[in-house]
Image (cartoon, helix red, strand yellow):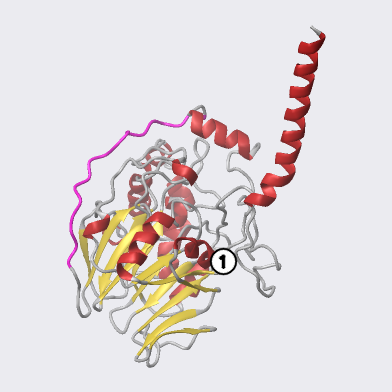
């Protein structure tokens, strides 16, 4: 018996020491220094932050501990409405190129969108993974990509908004880099993550641009003056990294070591492209900053993953349909496509709730639902040249509209 007690005691001591070492060492091991640069109004020398406040981006959206949130999420014990295990998708094969002012847009899924115009193929946050998490863990895809990876045309430009797994998929980036060597533009720090698969990215701060001119790509620090029609002098195409309101992490300990962003792609004619990335509303001023670069022909705006408790309409990290209407109006966009819904189950709402709520809110506020309408996976959508919208939602009605029974009844 004494020998058994000694073995048990030794085992317990070993486990205690191992746990203590893990608590001390593992977080530091998982932490990463993705960026080392000067301090700014959104970087304290070690980590990035939202200059308009952190609101609830630092805590689990349901309150309590982060471990508890993930336990309830992965065990399905948080009372979420059910989602389908899969939805039917018929993948399509896009054209090789779309020349001139025509713009054809194909929603691949989640925040992955193919934009074809001016002879360029632009891809946002490419994720072809079957799950959105490390080591194959995380939420599983319920909708296959609307375009098979091998059926993509040659990609010229990739925009990567931040480093969350449902937006930065290293395996997909590796395949696209090895096949096409595209220009990859991202925000500060994410280039070091992308480099782990051998790909090269240009990482910019908010307000900086990657410009395509006669001598190829070049980086400009600060926003140059652009014409009212959105064209920058002497440039054929520019990619502006712009402010939004979010956070970043690949693990638990590397929080906000890399920056998050939205993008404006200015085009020679026809209006600009806006990609919101992943964002909460924050101070709500960043859409106007993007619109100041010229009229927006197409905006890609997230509407999903907004409900983490019953009845919730948005979180600090994500905009729901209500705030998406605000962003759409403040951008003054001629056309918008809702993204970031229906692909990965990331939150509490039913799968079809985001587009249904968006449609009801647009109708209630006097907006035009046809201008901010969902696209089917893989469906090529022709985007008309920019014309100033004559029918815009009335933001002052949003609170009243959100209180209507048909909207409150959506789970």
Residue 281, position as x, y percentages in the image = 53, 58
Q: Is residue 327 left or right of residue 391?
A: right
84 to 180, vertically: above or below:
above
Residue 4 is inside the magenta segment: no
Q: Which residue sits at x=47%, y=55%?
A: 323
21 to 185, vertically: above or below:
above
Using the image as rendered, state which of residue 406 and residue 285 is in the foreground. Answer: 285
Q: Which residue sits at x=43%, y=57%?
A: 170
In magenta, the rendered stretch is: 78-95
Using the image as rendered, state which of residue 380 and residue 299 is in the foreground. Answer: 380
Does residue 366 show up? no
**In the figure, residue 136 lies in which quadrant?**
top left
Among all residues in the image, which is located at the extreme right?
Answer: 2
Query: What kind of secondary structure does the magenta stretch mostly adopt?
Result: loop
Residue 92 is inside the magenta segment: yes
**In the figure, residue 325 lies in which quadrant?**
bottom left
Residue 341, position as x, y percentages in the image = 38, 48
Which residue is identified by label 1?
189
| SS assignment at label 1 | loop
Residue 391, position as x, y percentages in the image = 32, 66
Among all residues in the image, which is located at the extreme top?
Answer: 1
Using the image as rendered, state which of residue 369 and residue 169 is in the foreground. Answer: 169
| Disc 1 packing (10 Å; few <14; some 14–19; many ≥20) | many
Q: Is residue 294 left or right of residue 55?
A: left
Q: Quadrant of the C terminus?
A: top left
Residue 24, position as x, y percentages in the image = 74, 44
Q: Which residue sits at x=29%, y=54%?
A: 374
């Amino acid at each position: 018996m004494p020998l058994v007690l000694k073995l048990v005691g030794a085992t317990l001591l070993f486990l205690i020491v191992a746990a203590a070492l893990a608590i001390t060492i593992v977080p530091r091991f998982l932490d990463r220094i993705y960026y080392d640069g000067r301090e700014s109004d959104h970087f304290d020398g070690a980590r990035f932050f939202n200059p308009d406040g952190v609101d609830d981006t630092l805590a689990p959206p349901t309150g309590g501990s982060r471990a508890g949130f993930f336990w309830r999420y992965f065990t399905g014990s948080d009372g979420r409405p059910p989602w389908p295990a899969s939805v039917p998708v018929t993948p399509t094969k896009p054209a090789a190129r779309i020349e001139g002012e025509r713009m054809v847009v194909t929603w691949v899924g989640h925040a992955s969108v193919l934009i074809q115009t001016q002879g360029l193929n632009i891809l946002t946050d490419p994720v072809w993974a079957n799950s959105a998490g490390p080591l194959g863990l995380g939420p599983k895809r319920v909708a296959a990509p609307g375009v098979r990876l091998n059926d993509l045309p040659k990609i010229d430009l990739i925009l990567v908004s931040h480093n969350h797994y449902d937006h930065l998929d290293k395996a997909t980036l590796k395949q696209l880099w090895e096949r096409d060597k595209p220009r990859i533009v991202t925000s500060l720090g994410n280039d070091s993550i992308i480099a782990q698969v051998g790909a090269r990215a240009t990482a910019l701060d908010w307000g900086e641009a990657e410009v395509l001119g006669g001598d190829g790509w070049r980086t400009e620090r600060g926003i140059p003056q652009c014409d009212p029609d959105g064209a920058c002098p002497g440039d054929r195409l520019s990619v502006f990294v712009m402010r939004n309101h979010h956070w970043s992490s690949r693990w638990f300990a590397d929080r906000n070591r890399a920056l998050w962003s939205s993008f404006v792609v200015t085009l020679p004619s026809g209006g600009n492209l806006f990609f919101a990335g992943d964002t909460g509303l924050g101070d709500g001023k960043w859409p106007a900053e993007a619109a100041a670069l010229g009229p927006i022909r197409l905006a890609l705006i997230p509407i999903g993953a907004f409900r983490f408790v019953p009845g919730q309409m948005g979180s600090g990290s994500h905009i729901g349909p209500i705030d998406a209407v605000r962003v759409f109006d403040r951008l003054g966009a001629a056309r918008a496509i809702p993204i970031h819904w229906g692909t990965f189950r990331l939150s509490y709402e039913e799968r079809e709730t985001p587009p249904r709520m968006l449609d009801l809110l647009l109708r209630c506020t006097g907006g035009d639902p046809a201008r901010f309408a969902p696209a089917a996976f893989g469906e090529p959508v022709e985007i008309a040249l920019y014309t100033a919208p004559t029918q815009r939602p009335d933001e002052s009605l949003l609170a009243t509209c959100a209180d209507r029974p048909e909207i409150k009844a959506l789970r």
